[in-house]
Image (cartoon, rainbow, N blue to C red):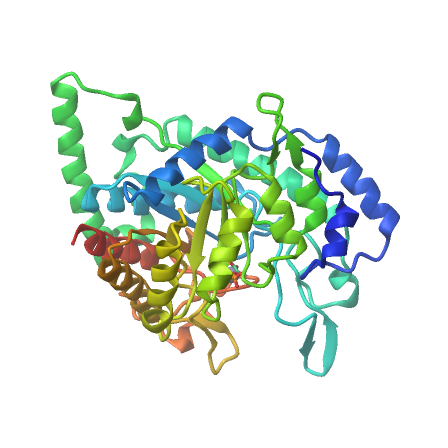
Amino acid sequence: MELPSLRDLYDLGAAQQPTWPDASEVDRVVDRLRRNPPLVFAGECDDLKAKLAAVTRGEAFLLQGGDCAETLEGATADNVRAKLRVLLQMAVVLTYAASVPVVKVGRLAGQYAKPRSSDMETREGVTLPAYRGDAVNGYDFTTESRVPDPQRLLDVYNSSAATLNLVRAFVTGGYADLRQVHTWNTDFVRSSPVGKRYERMAGDIDRALTFMKAIGADPEEFHRVDFHSSHEALVLEYEHALTRIDSRTELPYDVSAHFLWIGERTRQLGGAHVELMSRIQNPIGVKLGPTTTPDDAIALAQRLNPLNEPGRLTFITRMGAGRIRTVLPELVEKVTAAGVQVAWVCDPMHGNTFEASSGYKTRRFEDVMEEVQGFFDVHRELGTWPGGLHVELTGDNVTECVGGGESLLEEDLSHRYESVCDPRLNRVQSLELAFLVADMLSQ
Ligand code: PEP
Ligand code: MN
């Protein structure tokens, strides 16, 4: 199958692309990227697709999480381990408390490019190009830093490779061993009420493992986990350069991550992102906001998954707590009635962002919960499967979202607000969310 060229894609209309200052430099970078080794293998993407087919059938639950925007600076061992740790804790809570297999996907090792609502940003009377993620320009609010620099795409590739390498070592090298459940519950989380609840559960798991071992059962699954990478497929040069023909199947795969998604702002049916994603074999997602009509969703499914293959397509709905109960039912009902095979996943973050009086972008934990509850209620009502959760989180003790068991207040936001883009749940809030979702799942 011929892939469209980058120029063909641009001709279709490409939303949210950087304005690179020097085209010949972009060509050189793309050329280098095309020769770089794949970050993931096609066969691994197929494995994830098979797991997402189980999600589509209602036999598994997807947990997808990580930063809104990774930073090159933040690609450290401590940071990656902390994110992995909170995802492993959440996954074990969901698996144990709800007895459902959990498919684990990180929003990491490539989540470096951001769509923006405005091209420009004004601070104290100064207007500069908006920050579009470390893949494009710098976060510092200076003229130099905000100029898009294509060399950053190579930095992102290298950082993603390093992150993925570490993640692979952690998940297969003993860190994700189920006998480590207690050690994931470290420092500040351990002493929190939810940390104590987790500790009790971990004790139960320990006893179950000891029993299994005593009867001679010690399967491989106790010692390692499957973990996959994902990011928003946004910068066309990067995703195009990393789309390769797999020698085994002779079909194209985007080898920058196992799972790619199309954002709410780039899901135009005839646009470049939908076109490129329609050509690759990876499992993919599309974010659907509150203005999505059932016809839009059905048309997207036909374009992106013409063979209606379960596992290929995930709809990630992000409606907002106030709208989920009115908007989601018709969408799910009509898409289901059209016979579309799709996994439904809830992003309870992006419809619930607001600006605190201090100027920080934040989200209320209670709104996040309310959207998840609405998502479960709607699917339960319709007899469809609430297939997963897509969240922005960090393994650190940040103060970016208000509320939750620690009752973070708007005044607390300035203590430790580190996100360069959207506010993330901290580790305690993430674990609380996992227990609440586990309760919903097991009902
Ligand atoms: C995001 O996931 O960070 C994002 C920008 O989401 P959306 O496309 O749903 O707005
Ligand atoms: Mn975000």
Residue 269 x/y as whole percent: 60, 58
Closer to the camera in the image, 234 or 177: 234
The residue lying furthest to the top in this view is 216
Residue at image position (18%, 19%) is 217
Residue at image position (64%, 46%) is 276
Closer to the camera in the image, 134 or 442: 442
Q: Decide if residue 163 is in sight here.
A: yes
Closer to the camera in the image, 79 or 29: 29
Q: Is residue 92 above or below residue 365?
A: above
Q: Is residue 146 above or below residue 167?
A: below
Residue 396 x/y as whole percent: 42, 54
Q: Decide if residue 192 is in sight here.
A: no
Residue 63 x/y as whole percent: 37, 47
Q: Is residue 5 above or below residue 421?
A: above
Residue at image position (74%, 72%) is 128
Query: In this rendering, would 340 be left or right of 68?
Result: left
Residue at image position (35%, 69%) is 324
The residue lying furthest to the front in this view is 338
Residue 6 x/y as whole percent: 76, 46
Q: In which quarter of the view is residue 238 placed? A: top right
Quarter of the figure that contains the N terminus: top right
Q: In which quarter of the view is residue 29 placed? A: top right
Query: In this rendering, would 344 be left or right of 137?
Result: left
Closer to the camera in the image, 121 or 251: 251
Quarter of the figure that contains the C terminus: bottom left
Number of labelled discs? 0
